[in-house]
Image (cartoon, grey):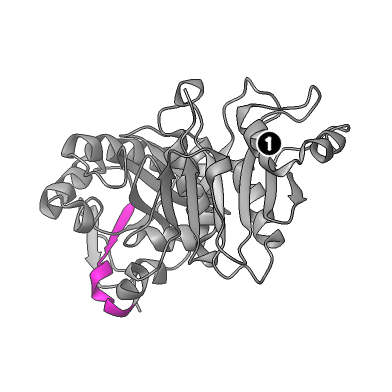
């Protein structure tokens, strides 16, 4: 497959019938996502499966019209944030702003080769001719050759990506005490500790879990020495497994999705193999303490981390006022 065709002066874009992930590694990649980083459909699923590190993207806290990115050796993977939530649609204003930010990063990172799908089109519904014109206008004289890969040319790979099943997330208004497990099932409860040192982190969510499963004494004992961010403390009772992920060094710090992701990886290793259909229980965070989409991002991150545990269910318990 010959990709190094002669680039005509002023020709910014070349459209090719190649699956994006078949491009040589000297090409940096880019695609569009929502601010909630769900990435649950289309080619975004491939980005999530191949590159992971969703928590690292979330910790960059990109807003709509900006770009998050991962660096892999000399290669960059760009995530254009074109809408607030995954179930919404981008606008031409939001994608234009993101393309301008992408251009700035391309210059800053000295990227000479970039491969993208028809960004903003397909599932997002924008007109490709118009989006292409925006890219051509913004990337004139930048010195970066852009290959637009026609994702739909590979029907098999496209079909496989759209068939990937994600964990089911259900929002409940019950107290933890009212959650009933199915026969032979163990519930998996995930709590977040936002400090690594004494005094011991304890809040209403910890208290509600403790009233039913009584893990406080073990937890306090484990906290007698300093902990590390990304660490996962584990307490096994007859009916539930309780996981405490340490997300922050101090409660005043921004909630760390990257540290949450580290803890989730450890949870996967601790889940008993006979949990054929695991149920995870998490509490919603109070938005005003952090950011508007924190709960959506947490659910997105857990869905991503537990993708290979599907079918599984995530029960999100609404926090009390």
| x and y, in percent, of residue 137 in the image | 19, 41
Segment tinted magenta in the rendering:
144-156
How many numbered marks are there? Answer: 1
Q: Residue at x 64, y 55 (%)?
A: 265
- Magenta stretch: residue 145 in it? yes
Does residue 135 show up? yes
Magenta stretch holds residue 38: no
Residue located at (40% from left, 28% from top): 292
Q: Secondary structure at mark 1?
A: helix
**Residue 192's image quarter?**
top right
Q: Position of residue 321 (x, y in %)?
A: 47, 22
- Closer to us: 67 or 263: 263
- Residue drawn at 58 percent across, 70 percent down: 276
Quarter residue 123 falls in: bottom left
Question: Residue 161, position in %: x, y?
Answer: 36, 69
Q: Quadrant of the N terminus?
A: bottom left
Can the viewer see residue 246 in this picture?
A: no
For label 1, the residue is: 211
Q: Position of residue 170 (x, y in %)?
A: 41, 49
- Residue 216 horizontal side relative to residue 158, left or right: right
Q: Residue at x 76, y 30 (%)?
A: 196
Q: Is residue 221 left or right of residue 86?
A: right
* In this rendering, position of residue 321 left or right of residue 128: right
């Amino acid at each position: 497959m010959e990709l190094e065709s002669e680039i005509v002066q002023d020709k910014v874009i070349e459209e090719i019938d190649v699956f994006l992930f078949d491009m040589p590694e000297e090409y940096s990649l880019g695609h569009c996502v929502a601010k909630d980083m769900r990435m649950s459909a289309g080619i975004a699923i491939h980005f999530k499966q191949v590159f992971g590190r969703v928590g690292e993207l979330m910790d960059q806290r990109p807003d709509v019209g900006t770009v998050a990115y991962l660096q892999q050796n000399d290669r960059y993977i760009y995530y254009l944030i074109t809408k607030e939530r995954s179930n919404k649609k981008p606008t031409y204003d939001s994608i234009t702003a993101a393309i301008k930010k992408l251009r700035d990063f391309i210059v800053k990172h000295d990227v000479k080769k970039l491969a993208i799908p028809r960004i903003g089109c397909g599932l997002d519904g924008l007109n490709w001719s118009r989006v292409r014109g925006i890219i051509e206008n913004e990337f004139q004289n930048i010195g970066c050759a852009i290959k637009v890969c026609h994702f739909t040319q590979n029907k098999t790979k496209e079909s496989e990506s759209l068939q990937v099943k994600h964990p089911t997330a259900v929002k409940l208004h019950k107290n933890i005490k009212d959650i009933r497990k199915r026969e032979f099932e163990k519930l998996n409860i995930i709590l977040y500790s936002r400090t690594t040192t004494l005094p011991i982190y304890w809040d209403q969510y910890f208290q509600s879990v403790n009233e039913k499963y009584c893990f406080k004494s073990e937890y306090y004992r484990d906290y007698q020495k300093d902990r590390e961010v990304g660490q996962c403390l584990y307490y096994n009772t007859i009916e539930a497994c309780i996981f405490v992920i340490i997300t922050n060094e101090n409660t005043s710090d921004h909630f760390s999705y990257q540290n949450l992701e580290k803890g989730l990886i450890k949870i996967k290793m601790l889940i008993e193999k006979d949990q054929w259909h695991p149920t995870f229980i998490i509490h919603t965070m109070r938005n005003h303490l952090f950011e508007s989409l924190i709960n959506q991002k947490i659910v997105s991150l857990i869905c991503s981390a537990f993708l290979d545990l599907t079918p599984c269910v995530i029960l999100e318990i609404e926090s009390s006022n």
